[in-house]
Image (cartoon, helix red, strand yellow):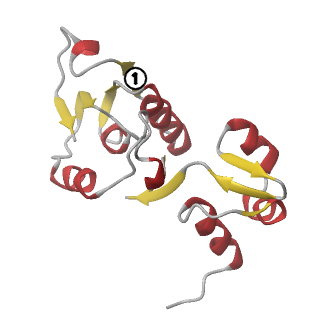
């Protein structure tokens, strides 16, 4: 296997393996972002001279997705990472241009972001406010501005609405 660059090694330790790195290591690889800003935003946690990511990062189909690490899966507001079932739904979804789509139970926003590439307006719903916040973070990070977020259970937030495409993982 190819040797990873030192920067990639630090990023993998932080955002893939949930390991702590020194503030200086984080500052080097995250520049121009500053560790203090990321600590204040809630992405990183500082303990002395070490920082640790509170969210994991994954790449799928050229997009970046933040979600919770698996070791938080017992939390009531846990946001599932991109996984096999989400990838399977993404692969079998017919990608044709449509006006409106619904991502029911959006989680970290995988289906919403993929659908936003071929849809005029995506509505993403979830009962978990953290999932909606994660979808917004991921939409902003990936430049998707055509996603509306609605909190609520199942079809409740979109009662009376019609969609050209409905996705539910």
Q: Which residue is mark 1?
A: 148
For image coordinates 30% across by 40% down, the residue present is 115
Of all residues, the one furthest to the bottom in this rendering is 1
Q: Is residue 146 above or below residue 112?
A: above
Locate residue 37 relative to residue 62 in the image: left or right: right
The reply, left or right, for residue 15 in relation to residue 85 is right
- x, y (%) of residue 134? 48, 37
Q: Is residue 161 above or below residue 148?
A: above
Question: How far across and down, in percent of the image, does residue 103 sit?
Answer: 27, 32
Q: Decide: few, some or many residues near mark 1? Use Cα within 10 Å; few <14, some 14-19, many ≥20.
A: some
130 or 11, which is in the foreground? 130
Task: Depth check: give the residue in front, 122 or 21.
Answer: 21
* Image location (x, y in percent) of residue 31: 78, 57
Q: Secondary structure at mark 1?
A: strand
Q: Identify the residue at image location x=66%, y=39%.
A: 42
Q: Residue at x 55, y 65 (%)?
A: 17
Q: Say which quadrant the C terminus sits in.
A: top left
Q: Is residue 47 visible?
A: yes
Residue furthest front in the image: 74
In this orientation, does residue 33 appear?
no
User: 94 above or below 41?
Assistant: below
How many numbered marks have been drawn onto this rendered protein structure? 1
In the current view of this chain or complex, which residue is farthest to the top?
Answer: 160
Residue 82 pos. (x, y %)? 36, 53
Tell me what residue is drawn at x 49 percent, y 91 percent.
1
């Amino acid at each position: 296997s190819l040797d990873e660059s030192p920067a990639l090694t630090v990023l993998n330790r932080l955002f893939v393996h949930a390991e702590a790195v020194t503030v200086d290591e984080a500052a080097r690889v995250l520049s121009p972002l500053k560790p203090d800003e990321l600590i204040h935003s809630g992405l990183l946690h500082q303990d002395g001279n070490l920082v640790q990511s509170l969210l994991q990062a994954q790449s799928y189909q050229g997009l970046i997705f933040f979600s919770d690490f698996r070791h938080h899966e017992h939390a009531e507001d846990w946001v599932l990472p991109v996984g096999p079932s989400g990838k399977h739904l993404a692969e079998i979804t017919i990608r044709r241009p449509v006006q409106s789509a619904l991502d029911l139970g959006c989680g970290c926003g995988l289906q919403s972001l993929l659908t936003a590439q071929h849809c005029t307006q995506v509505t993403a719903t979830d009962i978990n406010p953290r999932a909606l916040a994660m979808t917004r973070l991921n939409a902003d990070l990936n430049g998707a501005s055509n996603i509306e977020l609605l909190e609520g259970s199942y079809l409740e937030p979109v009662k009376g609405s019609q969609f050209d495409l409905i996705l539910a993982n």
